[in-house]
Amino acid sequence: MIDWGAIFSNAAVELISPTTAAYALAALGLAVHFGYTGLLNFGQAGFMALGAYGYAISTLTFGFPVWASVLVGIGASVVFALILGIPTLRLRADYLAIVTIAAAEIVRLLFTTNTFQPVTGSANGLSGYKGGFADLNPIPPGTYGFGPFEYNAYDWWLRIVAWTVVILACLFTWQIMRSPWGRVIKGIREDEDAVRALGKNVYAYKMQSLILGGVFGTIAGMIFVLPRAVVPSNYQTSLTFFVYAILLLGGAATILGPVIGSMIFWVLLSFFSGFIARAVEAGWLPFMTSIQAGQLRFILVGVAIMLIVIYRPQGIFGNKKELAFVK
Amino acid sequence: MTNSSPLVDATPAPVRNAVVEVKNVTAGYVPGVNILNECSLTAYDGELIGIIGPNGAGKSTLLKSIFGLVKVREGEIRLRGDNITNLKANKLVSKGVGFVPQTNNVFPTLTIQENLEMGMYQKPKGLAERLEFVTEIFPELRKRLGQRAGSLSGGERQMVAMSRALMMGPHVLLLDEPSAGLSPVRQDEAFLRVKEINKAGVTTIMVEQNARRCLQICDRGYVLDQGRDAYTGTGRELLNDPKVIGLYLGTLGQDDE
Amino acid sequence: MSNNIVPTAKPVKTVDMHIGEAVPGCKKKDPILVVDGVSRTFGGLKAVDVEHLEIPRGAITALIGPNGAGKTTLFNLLTGFDKPDTGSWTFEGTSIGGMAAFKVARMGQVRTFQLTKALGLLTVMDNMLLGAKAQVGENLFRAVLPFLWRQQEADNRVKALDLLARFKLDTKKDDYAASLSGGQRKLLEMARALMSDPTLVMLDEPMAGVNPALTQSLLDHILNLKAEGMSVLFVEHDMHMVRHIADWVIVMAEGKVVAEGDPHEVMRNQAVIDAYLGQHHDEDLGEDPDAEKEHVGAIKELLDDEL
């Protein structure tokens, strides 16, 4: 029989998993880019890769302490945003889209190539960088929690840090979007010329937005790799599309949207993959193998994105009256 | 069996055929929001009908409802007695209805000739003769048939759009603000052309922002307000009606400086 | 076409602003904008070719001319939305040729657009607040600390409400601008432009798409601008409006300035009538039912031709 208990508890733990937090933060970055400013950034995976590798390489190759590694990652992110933005932000939105997809892939391939293997680990990636972070942990070793939410000290430390960062990022974003700066950004989303005619330097605002959302993506990349290893194949374009799925599900121009969207996304994904895997084992789906079943959930993500965009483009929390990308 | 009183003229009034009948039509773009609210209009054979009114009153929506570009939610529309409510625009073109839109009225990457060909694409035979006729009506186009429509000025595009609508030889012509954005001399040309087309026998319905000029040339006019046909009368009646002047026409044209 | 309704009081015109003869490019006694040798070519077509032009200060100047004459292109050049091929111009004595649009706006020269750019996804009040100058809160780092900009925002709100009341839009302040009618959006765009206390207001076809009954109130608003010391330059096709409020008229055709002068003089100029106003501009088009017959025969042939 199917172990429903295991399926549900595996799904439930995704609610606070650090992966969920990382995706929530990456989606928040895209909310700043796309939801609020109207920038078509299809390279968020690239920003995340820079965070992951920036942190890991600084720690492993240069022996930097945690705070320095974080700063290196953020620095790389800012430079990346400038490289993307300087040529494209004066052009049509579509150009940014094309350039960002290409740039993210270039970043990934640079990290995969054997040329830099001593530093990047090429296709095998990097591991063993968690020490510095673990050393900062104030929680004494042991197991804490209840039911499915039982973790050791490191895992709890990671979750606390991850979600604190997410909450801080949310508060920061909420505050700036309510401010005059946010108002200019929302104006730019709808009509750049109108905002220019009111004396605002549109190019500078778009660049600031690109950098801010990119930094969120980079920090998300760092959170993402703390419970696992840095592997370049994780940062393909499909990662960006998953983040978009989360963003659209929750509501592109909202603060809660990316967070709740991420939670729902991972809970459902875990539920479906758990269910399908066990259903195949139990013989309910004789026409599929377990490996195929594993892929099915990604098909479901694709279908879900299509349905959201067609039937409820504003997502769960979005306001239809403010939707800039639906005419 | 007649009850004729000596005061009543015994000659029967000429029977007028209603070509376009809009009966209590309710329509809109966004679900739940109606732009037209039980609007009615009748155009008899050979008439030139003007539709004026404030922004948002539903003038363009009314025209688009007749042409099948906006969903009619209640009411019906008839063309010479046939029910054409919500009939797709391409079917209406084959029934002899032409439409001249206000914006995006030419294909900018196509030449003038190609634009005119598009007007006839349902029945492309006889194109050459048609082009002859149309360039007689609009001689300015004759030398420029190979020019890309995107490089034309607003007034010239208007001309191309009108010619394209004429290519199928329509017996009903719908025009959406033909004078919009044109300089005074081009506006007058547009209005006079519409008058000529109507004189040639085409039942014409035009929506206009330039209310004064529109009422000067039309046979009958409708003043729309909030999706309803608020006033109707002959063009002259409406031009001189103080209510209409006060609400829509404004007094600017009246002062002689 | 007579009636007994009396129009509102005739505006007082500013006269005697030019030096010498009223010819194209003539100098003005107190110009706010001086344009020299500006040209712009689009793919072989010279859209703008203005040798010299001076816009008088504190007056309402109309820019008229046929479509394709270069009026909107000139507007775009002067306000920084387009770069000229040659030329320079000064605003209040400062050279601003080639300056970016947002900088031009900050110098006190604001413009509206032919196709209204009221930001529909923002509320009316947010539209207005966007128009205010030098906002501390618009800086990313200061935006995070509300106490730095709260007071300024409150002051701007008061100013916005005052302007909205003047344009009769105050009751709509929390509505999304998309829910306003076309005419109301034009008013909003104008009110928003005034938030920055501009010196020169450039209006691109302010009457386009506006219900004739609203025209009078729009004209009063423009006259108010002059009363408050601003200079106005507007592009229009509505000659009644031009005659009513313009102090000076500039006529463009094929990229060049072909006539300048007082509205009445200019409208009696034969060249202007031929190219732009048309012979019938003061007549009633419907009066003579036999007037236009030239093409009726050809149209009838077209209609009778069976496909």
Image: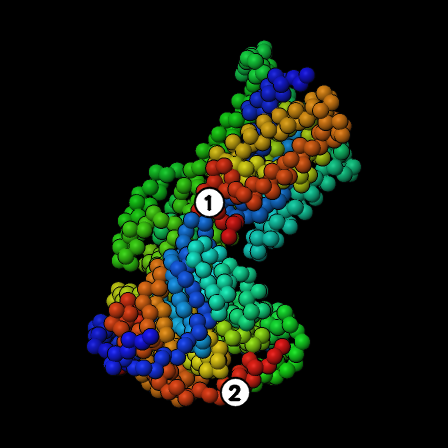
Residue at (28% x, 71% y) in the render? B245
Of the pair B123 and C90, the residue shown nearer to us: B123
Classify mark 2: helix, strand or loop. helix
- Letter of the chain that mark 2 sits on in the rendering: C
Asked if A192 appears above or below B199 in the picture, the reply is above
Asked if A275 appears above or below C183 in the picture, the reply is above
Residue identifier under label 2: C297
* x, y percent for residue A38: 52, 48
Residue at (25% x, 67% y) in the render? C227
Q: Are marks 2 and 1 on the same chain?
A: no
Which kind of residue does numbered mark 2 sit on? Answer: Gly
Which quadrant of the rendered structure holds the C terminus of chain C?
A: bottom right
User: Does A72 sit left or right of A190 as displayed?
Assistant: right
* x, y percent for residue B146: 64, 78
Of the pair C94 and A84, the residue shown nearer to us: A84
Label 2 Cα neighbours within 10 Å, binned few <14 / some 14-19 / many ≥20: some
Q: Is residue C253 visible?
A: no
Residue identifier under label 1: A320
Residue C157 is marked as none
User: Does C28 sit left or right of A187 as displayed?
Assistant: left
* x, y percent for residue B39: 38, 61
User: Does B9 sit left or right of C138 as displayed?
Assistant: left
How many numbered marks does the figure carry? 2
Residue A147 is drawn in which quadrant?
top right
Q: Is residue A279 visible?
A: yes
Classify mark 1: helix, strand or loop. helix
Label 1 Cα neighbours within 10 Å, binned few <14 / some 14-19 / many ≥20: some
Q: Nearer the viewer, mark 2 or mark 1?
A: 2
